[in-house]
Image: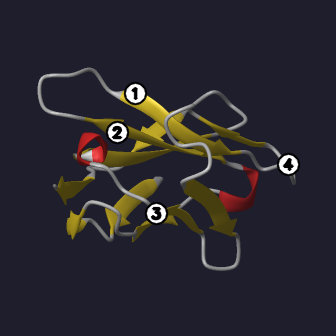
Amino acid sequence: QVQLVESGGGVVQAGGSLRLSCAVSGGSFSAFDMGWYRQAPGKEREFVASIGWRPGSIDYADSAKGRFTISRDNAKTTVYLQMSSLKPEDTATYYCNAGTVYGMLYWGKGTLVTVSS
């Protein structure tokens, strides 16, 4: 059974940085496509960034380009989201997900990021 646990959220001032982590257990992490999504209060969940199992397969939402960096460590079965130049509109609960080659999709429970102005 695949389980995802996000960590690294917290309160940060505008312009600051945070690094989120998503530790994955179960399954074959190196074969997973991993993604970060976020959901602000009263809004729908939205895509932030993804990193595929193939080297170089990285994508970002326009809102994340130039400020966020997604990476993965297959040895540690962990995916990261380095966030810098944070803005109050980045305030949300951040979720990671894992997609398998069989079409299964797993989600973590999220970590809250609050950016104060």
Residue on which disc 4 sits = 54
x 60%, y 43%: residue: 65
Amino acid at circle 3: Ser
CA neighbours of label 4 inside 10 A, class few (<14), some (14 to 19), many (20+): few
4 and 2 marks in contact (CB < 8 Å): no
x 23%, y 47%: residue: 88
Residue on which disc 1 sits = 46
Which quarter of the figure has residue 55? Answer: bottom right
Return the x and y of residue 89 as percentages of the image width and height.
Answer: 27, 40
Q: Quadrant of the C terminus?
A: bottom left
Return the x and y of residue 45 as percentages of the image width and height.
Answer: 32, 27
Depth-wise, is mark 1 or mark 4 nearer the camera?
Answer: 1
Residue on which disc 3 sits = 84
Left or right: where does residue 108 sit relative to residue 91? Answer: right
Residue on which disc 2 sits = 38
Depth-wise, is mark 3 or mark 1 nearer the camera?
Answer: 3
